[in-house]
Amino acid sequence: MAGAHENLPLPDYDHVTVGALPAAIASLSADEVAQLLEYERMHGDRLPVTTVLEHRLEALRGGATPSGGDPTAARPETNVAPGGGGVSPATSGPPINPPSQGVPTNPAQPR
C-alpha cells in the first residue's frame, strides 16, 4: 500500500531534499517510483517533488534503466559525523567577544 510510510522503497523519503531526489530515485524501478509518486500525492503533494517523480517514471517507462546503486545508502545531507556529531568543549570554537556597539562598559567603544 502506498499510504504506509514504512513500506516505501526509499528509506527516509520524507527527509530527502528536492535537489537530492533525482539521485536518490535513480536506482528504483518504475513500480517503486510509481509507489513514491502515489504516496507523495496522498501526503505532501509538493509540485517540485511530483514533477521529479513524474519525469523519472516517464523516463523509466520510455526505456530508461535503473542505475546500479543502493537507495538505502547514506546521502551527504543525512550523514552524521562519527561520534554523533555533537559539539563539545574540545570541538567548539574560540569564545567570541560581543560587538563594541551596545556594550557600554567596553573601553574601545567610541564616545
Image: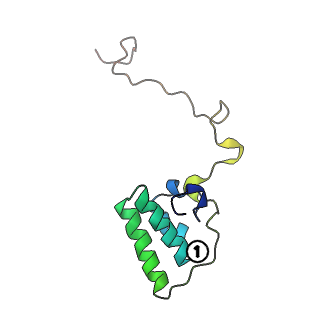
| Residue 79 seen in render | yes
In the rendered image, the vertical position of residue 49 relative to residue 56, given as above or below: above
| Residue 54, horizontal then vertical, whole percent | 41, 73
Amino acid marked by disc 1: Ser
Disc count in the image? 1
Q: Secondary structure at mark 1?
A: loop
Answer with the quarter of the image where residue 37 lies.
Answer: bottom left
> In the picture, which quadrant includes the C terminus?
top left
Pick whichever, 17 or 80, lies toward us: 17
Answer with the quarter of the image where residue 91 lies.
Answer: top right
| Residue 36, horizontal then vertical, whole percent | 50, 66
Structure colour scheme: rainbow
| Residue 12 seen in render | no
Which residue of the protein is positioned furthest toward the top in this rendering? 105
Pick whichever, 28 or 32, lies toward us: 32
Residue at image position (63%, 38%) is: 86
Residue at image position (35%, 12%) is: 104
Q: Residue under circle 1?
A: 27
